[in-house]
Image (cartoon, rainbow, N blue to C red):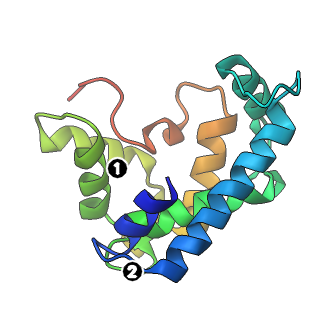
Amino acid sequence: MALRMTIIEGKGEFNYSRYQENLHIMLSLWDEIADLADFDKNDVVTTEEFKKAMQSSCVGRSYNDFPQAMKMFIDSHFKILDINEDGVIGAEEFRYDCASRIAVDNVDILDKAYQSLLNDDDRRRGGLNLSRYQELYAQFLGNPDDNCPAIYLFGPIGQES
């Protein structure tokens, strides 16, 4: 995961010092996850243990209340998505991210998902800034409401158009 983040952040270029930073983030995240989720202390985090840990540390909490390593992971992910490094995830960057991870057959599906994320402030600024991304990420992890806009943070749900 650290190598992937480094190469994506560098748009194909490998920066060893950035790799070391990303490796530290990933190892810290894993240590925190293991501390939170390895309930039986067998050095294995099962899917069920992970779900329980995410529920106890994320549901109903704001970004500021998340474990430090989780915040570092979220912030690093924002940097990956902000391809042009302008501090805002625009529609094109959102499309690129979605198209690189999921199969879609219509750009309108991606645009609809992106527009569903935006509030009036986001539209005025031209997209999602870091603090708004953090807020949406916290909602994605911690808000059980299926009508919450954050459900579209990683792309469209199904193939609705």
Q: How many marks?
A: 2
User: Which sits in the foreground, 45 or 68?
Assistant: 45
Around disc 2, counting alpha carbons within 10 Å, would you say few (fewer than 14), some (14 to 19), or many (20 or more)?
A: few
The numbered dot on residue 85 is 2
Residue 18 in the image: x percent, y percent? Answer: 52, 77
* First along the sequence among labels 2 and 1: 2
Q: Position of residue 150 (x, y in %)?
A: 52, 42
Q: Secondary structure at mark 1?
A: helix
Identify the residue at image location x=54%, y=24%.
Answer: 146
Q: Nearer the viewer, residue 31 or 105?
A: 31
Between 68 and 32, the one lying in front of the other is 32
Q: Is residue 53 visible?
A: yes
Element type where label 2 sits in the image: loop
Q: Is residue 114 above or below residue 2?
A: above
* Circle 2: residue type: Glu
Q: Which residue is mark 1?
A: 115
Picture coordinates of residue 39, whole percent (x, y):
87, 25
Answer above or below: position of 101 versus 78.
above
Instruction: Please rate how many residues cluster around mark 1, counting C-alpha atoms within 10 Å: few if below 14, some from 14 to 19, many from 20.
Output: some
